[in-house]
Amino acid sequence: MAAALYSGDPGDTKNLHGSTYASLTCRITEIDGNQIHFDRPLRFDVKLAWRPQIRSFEPTVTESGVENLCFEFPNTPYGGHFTEPGYNAVAFYGAADCWARNLMITNADSGIFPNGRFCTIENIVFESAREPDTALRCTGHHGINFAGEDNLFTGFDFRTRFVHDISVGSLRLRQHHAHGKGVDLCLDHHCRAPYENLFTDIDTGAGTRLWQCGGGAALGKHCAARGTFWNIRAAVPQQYPPVAFGSASLNFVALQTELPSEKNSAGRWFEAIPPAEISPPDIHAAQLARRLGAKVISLHRHQIRLGQRKPAPCDCPQGGADDEVVRAGAVVDPEGGAAAIDGDEVGEGGFGALGLRCRLPAARGLRFRVCHEHPVMMAVVDGNVAELIIAAGAHEHAQVVRVQDGVADDIVVEVEVEEMPAPGLSCR
């Protein structure tokens, strides 16, 4: 099986000792005689010689999360790889449909260990004031170390270096890493057949160690089949990773590089498109929108200027009442056609095509009001933009209003909008 998961190019696997396995969590839609139908396509071969099994999916924890917290550990010098006392922030085990969001992790040995399925880790900041180790100039071991399958890590900001910033390995599969940045990221693939993992819309910073990996000897190449790297930016041009990194079935599209393209459908796929020119910039968001039949509107780099008393219109995407906004850096209600505020820090709820859909609980003294029938609204905490919310159909002259302690302030908002083309979508 290891050879299959590496597209026939596993490298040295003598220390795996037959421990390789693959799994897919899905629903059974039909049983017809000796045939079983799933709601998802298989992502690997199934051979009777591997003794395949169908088991019930019974996670121990569901619909639970950790959010709106800061984990701060003692500011002690980092002793180096494998010397850590265990200053670790969050771990999931046997979890499904869980989350960690809006976390600040400071001075950690390791940040997050999410072992589960269908979990979302979003809006995480890693920082450290610790003295780095002398060998690798890092301040911790793992930033995030994924296990399980079908998880999403998005909106991350590494302000320090870990030995392994983002790790996948030991059969970690279909982990999606999107819309993040770091001072000098390494995308660590830890051997043991991590396959079909996606990295998209990432600014890796200095770019001095992008392909630096760990994992142990004779456990297969670092990255298995169809690992995909899409819109990966760096301060310096990047090279194709070394032969020991992965099999020839890897995909590289819009990597910061000066190398020429090499497009081989039966092997290496390397499209040397400048990252600034790639569309869509986030392939995960685009594929999600296509599956949901929705539009994707990505908003980021918000800036707010307070103290300007003159109201001003906010340029915003224009859509219809039946449109869906599925990427606003927030929780999404695709069925209701609305984006929601992210988490309980500001409030949860959505604004649909006819205005306010549900009551927003007050948090930190913030309350909101609807300015127009189809508003664009921004949640503001202590003068900083916490979240931008777009209704399903924005009013032509919608304004952003902050209401705190019953006093409304007109503000000017500068927003950069990335439009992923879809029929009927325009931006004014």
Image: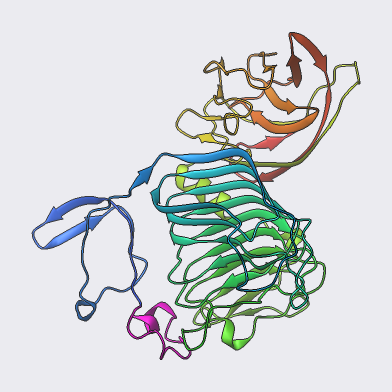
The location of residue 37, given as percent across then percent down, is 22, 56
The location of residue 213, given as percent across then percent down, is 61, 77
Q: Is residue 5 magenta?
A: yes
Total numbered badges shown on the rendered structure: 0
In this view, the residue in front, 113 or 412, is: 113
Where residue 185 sits, quadrant-wise, is bottom right
- Whether 231 is drawn above or below 298: the answer is below
Q: Is residue 294 visible?
A: no
- Whether 361 is drawn above or below 53: the answer is above
Where residue 360 sits, quadrant-wise, is top right
Quarter of the figure with the N terminus:
bottom left
Viewed as shown, does residue 61 lie left or right of 292?
A: left
Q: Is residue 52 visible?
A: yes
The location of residue 421, given as percent across then percent down, is 63, 46
In this view, the residue in front, 285 or 6, is: 6
Quarter of the figure with the C terminus:
top right
Viewed as shown, does residue 112 lie left or right of 1?
A: right
Q: For the magenta stretch, what is the residue range? A: 1-19
